[in-house]
Image: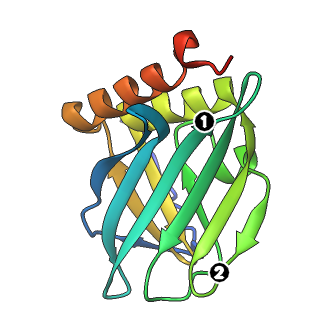
């Protein structure tokens, strides 16, 4: 019998994995009973303070959306990102706006890219990265939250709500 020697390489990561549970809620903002903003809110404890990460979309002209990502925390946040199986929010939303102590990103994004991002996070989950910490979003997201988000965006992009 041959003996196999396994060598494990332990990599030292520059972030710590937090075991705090991430609670996911839907974001729905209406204007005259028509969805104006649709998104997801992630609530968790970051460095002993309740923290909320929000990613939401607003409809713009053409085939684009205005996507916004913000962190609300008592801690100062230098950098943040949400990563799914194949996408990084920071690569889809390119304009970063620093607002002390919170973090804010906003930019016009391709509707297809954002739809795929939300599809991946709703089904497969992902990770929220804040500074040197990582928080796991377990997928699939609760069916009530998924349905609220999908209904909101479906209504938002309905052609009969287009301005004349």
Expressed as whole percent of the image width and height from the top left, the position of residue 97 reads 74, 70
Marks 1 and 2: which is nearer the front?
A: 2
**148 and 128: which is toward the camera:** 148
Up-down relation of residue 115 to residue 49 (above or below) = above
Expressed as whole percent of the image width and height from the top left, the position of residue 68 reads 61, 53
- Secondary structure of the residue carrying tag 2 is loop
Q: Is residue 135 visible?
A: yes
Q: Report which residue position mark 2 lands on.
A: 78
Between the C-alphas of marks 1 and 2, the distance is 24 Å
Task: Give the residue drawn at x 32%, y 64%.
Answer: 43
Give left or right: position of 52 versus 160.
left
Quadrant the C terminus occupies: top right
The colour scheme applied to this rendered structure is rainbow
Expressed as whole percent of the image width and height from the top left, the position of residue 58 reads 59, 40
- Secondary structure of the residue carrying tag 1 is loop
Label 2 packing within 10 angstroms: few (<14), some (14-19), many (20+):
some
Q: Is residue 3 visible?
A: no
Up-down relation of residue 6 to residue 104 (above or below) = above
Q: Which tag, 1 or 2, sits closer to the chain's start?
A: 2
Up-down relation of residue 11 to residue 162 (above or below) = below
Task: Give the residue drawn at x 66%, y 23%.
Answer: 112
Task: Give the residue drawn at x 65%, y 80%.
Answer: 78
The quadrant in which residue 159 appears is top right
Q: Report which residue position mark 1 lands on.
A: 86
Quadrant the N terminus occupies: top left
């Amino acid at each position: 019998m041959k003996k196999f020697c396994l060598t494990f390489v332990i990599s030292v990561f520059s972030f710590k994995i937090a075991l705090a549970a991430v609670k996911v809620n839907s974001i729905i903002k209406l204007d005259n009973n028509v969805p104006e903003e649709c998104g997801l809110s992630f609530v968790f404890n970051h460095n002993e303070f309740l923290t909320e990460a929000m990613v939401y979309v607003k409809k713009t002209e053409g085939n684009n959306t205005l996507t916004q990502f913000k962190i609300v925390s008592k801690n100062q946040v230098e950098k943040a990102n949400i990563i799914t199986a194949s996408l990084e929010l920071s690569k889809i939303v390119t304009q970063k706006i620093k607002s002390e102590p919170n973090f804010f990103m906003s930019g016009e994004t391709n509707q297809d890219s954002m739809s795929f991002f939300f599809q991946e996070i709703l089904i497969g989950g992902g990770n929220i990265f804040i500074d040197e910490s990582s928080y796991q979003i377990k997928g699939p997201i609760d069916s009530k939250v998924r349905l609220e988000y999908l209904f909101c965006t479906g209504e938002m992009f309905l052609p009969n709500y287009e301005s004349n």
